[in-house]
């Protein structure tokens, strides 16, 4: 076999994975990584935790040093080398050594682009002032840490409440700073559905972080004692440092100039082998546009898991293996103080945008057996096709065990599983780890019951829409009287479950009855009683607990 020369632009998640896999498959290939920063294979995902001191040794973030690539993998790593041009017709790239300033031209048989994404930096006046940071790489992290060492670092404003913003805010608070988060959207974690992220606001408040939603930043000003972030509503929030974390854009500068095809979302278009419009050039990671596994639409999903898998897959394809990328489904997770929020597949928002019909249910199950100490609630939203029950997406939050449920559902989605498969999923159980009917099974049972017509479901979003139009459904609250006395919804009929069978005559036969309890379980029983007595009824999914979450999103 003739020796291939494979050049890789970018030596972190996608690039480093690609290089290592290539070497494992092809001992004779010449593999060169060009990385413009001074580190390769570092853990971007760990950066906020070094800022907060959770990771105390900076070296821990360096997953593999250039020397290791050379010694163990026989890969030539050239750090501080920036690729400035790609010439597909000549199969060459131009590289500037940032130490010496010398430009060289390098020939390739295959080129892999993994330059990642750039933090979005709007042209707000003041965006380039000192102490206005983004957080993308080790250099950014070091600059933020250097600022934190100074005495004048007491107040931080984090712009953006996505996962990088939240993680950074938490870690700045951990360092003792007074933190404000400003988010333009009316919800934190805008990739998720609004009612599934209400816990973030409560968690922020609990930890003295001032989370302000639906706030638009207009300017960053220099003041006599630091900075101030000005907002469209006329406010000025003082800060010693500002972190701009409002998202990223694929870094397509090189590809664009080289005439490589870009897609409607602004990323590089690749086929299922991660090959670009040029057959000798592959692209992986944050720079590419992927196919959303559920909606089958183009999407930008800048996450480490897809970048690593794509890097590996591109190496396979270069080595002639028959591989196909399945698409990305956005499986992701964020921790914010004691809360964990995770998602996989489509959200309600993305399905509405794509015009795909869906049904949804909410469950509030324990992370492990309730009788075992320390049980915590997991709120799970399962979204599925009303036609065949195929699982389309899931989101969850809670203190513990959220990752396990979302991971199980993520694999289910990839295998085209239905809610009936979740009913049947055999999952590990001992009291400290789970329940004999796991939260995942419960979500499957509830959805399966809805699909079979055993328990028609109603959603609070629909209930609110009808109510706001003045046609509130006939709503029956079957919670115990004490619970109702503590908090109840205006205009509901209240009959505790224990009295329902004897008080059926109080209920209408000419209207559909929307039933709720606290979490949706007792109301399921009530719906079964009503249906078997000739009433029309549906269960308001997630009960009063989900009502409160939905209400919180509507108050904004
Ligand atoms: P990158 O890992 O960004 O690597 C691209 C590299 O290319 C960079 O080092 C860059 O210097 C180099 N480069 C660019 N242009 C050139 C050029 N012209 N010449 C030479 N070199 C060049 N994802 C998760 O799934 N979970 C998480 O918890 C998570 N946390 C994150 C936290 C932070 C703070 C950040 C910033 C990201 C996080 N991510 C997380 C996202 C994840 O890190 C990225 O999706 C992933 O690293 C993308 O891999 P990549 O190879 O495409 O790009």
Image: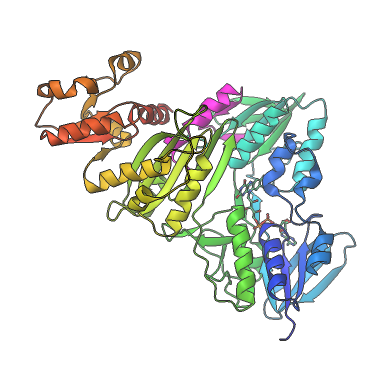
Does the magenta run of residues contain 192?
yes
Relative image position of residue 71 (x, y in whole percent): 84, 65
Which of the image's four quarters has the C terminus?
Answer: top left
Q: What's the residue at 80%, 74% (across, down)?
A: 105
Does the magenta run of residues contain 267?
no
Q: Is residue 73 above or below residue 404?
A: below
Q: What's the residue at 63%, 66% (across, down)?
A: 312
Judge whether residue 536 can be spotted in this image.
no
Relative side of 96 to 52, left or right: right
Relative image position of residue 239 (x, y in whole percent): 70, 27
In the rendered image, the residue lying farthest to the front is 430
Judge whether residue 257 can be spotted in this image.
yes
Magenta residues, start to end: 191-219
Residue 35, picture quadrant: bottom right
Q: Nearer the viewer, residue 494 or 118?
A: 494
Which of the image's four quarters has the N terminus?
Answer: bottom right
In the rendered image, the residue lying farthest to the right is 100
The number of numbered badges drawn on the structure is 0
Q: Is residue 457 above or below residue 240?
A: below
Q: What's the residue at 30%, 26% (across, down)?
A: 517
Q: Is residue 474 above or below residue 392?
A: above
Relative image position of residue 205 (x, y in whole percent): 56, 23
Relative side of 489 to 70, left or right: left
Relative image position of residue 90 (x, y in whole percent): 71, 81
Q: Nearer the viewer, residue 525 or 162?
A: 525
């Amino acid at each position: 076999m003739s020796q291939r020369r494979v050049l890789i632009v970018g030596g972190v998640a996608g690039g480093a994975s690609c290089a290592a896999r290539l070497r494992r498959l092809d001992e004779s290939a010449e593999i060169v990584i060009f990385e413009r920063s001074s580190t390769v294979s570092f853990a971007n995902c760990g950066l906020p935790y070094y800022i907060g001191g959770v990771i105390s040794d900076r070296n821990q973030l360096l997953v593999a040093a250039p020397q290791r690539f050379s010694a163990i993998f026989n890969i030539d790593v050239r750090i501080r080398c920036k690729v400035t041009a790609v010439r597909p017709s000549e199969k060459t790239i131009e590289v500037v050594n940032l130490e010496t300033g010398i430009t060289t031209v390098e020939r390739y048989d295959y080129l892999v682009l993994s330059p990642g994404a750039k933090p979005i930096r709007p042209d707000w006046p003041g965006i380039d002032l000192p102490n206005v940071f983004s957080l993308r790489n080790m250099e950014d992290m070091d600059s933020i840490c250097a600022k934190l060492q100074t005495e004048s670092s007491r107040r931080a404003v984090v712009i953006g409440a996505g996962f990088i913003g939240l993680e950074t805010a938490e870690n700045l608070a951990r360092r003792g700073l007074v933190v404000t988060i400003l988010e333009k959207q009316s919800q934190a974690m805008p990739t998720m559905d609004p009612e599934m992220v209400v816990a973030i606001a409560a968690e922020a408040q609990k930890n003295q972080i001032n989370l302000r939603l639906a706030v638009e930043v207009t300017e960053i000003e220099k003041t006599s004692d630091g900075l101030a972030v000005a907002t469209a509503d006329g406010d000025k929030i003082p800060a010693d440092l500002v972190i701009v974390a409002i998202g990223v854009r694929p870094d397509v500068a090189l590809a664009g100039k080289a005439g490589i095809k870009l897609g409607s979302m602004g990323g590089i278009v690749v086929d299922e082998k991660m090959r670009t419009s040029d057959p000798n050039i592959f692209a992986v990671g944050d720079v590419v546009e992927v196919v959303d596994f559920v909606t089958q639409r183009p999407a930008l999903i800048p996450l480490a898991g897809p970048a690593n898998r794509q890097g590996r897959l591109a190496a396979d394809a270069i080595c002639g293996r028959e591989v196909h990328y399945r698409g990305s489904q956005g499986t992701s997770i964020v921790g914010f103080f004691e809360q964990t929020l995770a998602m996989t597949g489509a959200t309600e928002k993305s399905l509405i945008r794509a015009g795909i019909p869906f049904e949804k249910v909410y469950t509030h199950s324990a992370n492990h057996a309730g009788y075992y100490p320390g049980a915590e609630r997991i709120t799970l939203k399962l979204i599925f096709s009303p036609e065949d029950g195929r699982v389309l997406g899931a989101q969850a939050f809670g203190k513990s065990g959220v990752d396990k449920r979302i991971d199980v559902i993520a694999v289910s989605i990839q295998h085209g599983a239905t809610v009936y498969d979740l009913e049947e999923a055999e999952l590990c159980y001992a009291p400290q780890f789970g329940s004999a009917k796991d939260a995942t099974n419960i979500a499957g049972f509830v959805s399966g019951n809805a699909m079979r017509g055993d328990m028609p479901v109603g959603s609070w979003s629909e209930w609110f829409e009808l109510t706001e139009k003045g046609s509130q459904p006939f709503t029956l609250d079957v919670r115990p009287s004490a619970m109702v006395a503590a908090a109840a919804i205006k205009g509901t009929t209240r009959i505790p479950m224990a009295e329902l069978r004897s008080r059926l005559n109080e209920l209408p036969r000419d209207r559909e009855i929307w039933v709720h309890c606290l979490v949706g379980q007792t109301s399921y029983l009530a719906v079964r009683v009503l249906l078997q007595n000739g009433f029309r009824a549906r269960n308001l999914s997630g009960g009063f607990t989900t009502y409160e979450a939905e209400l919180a999103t509507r108050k904004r």
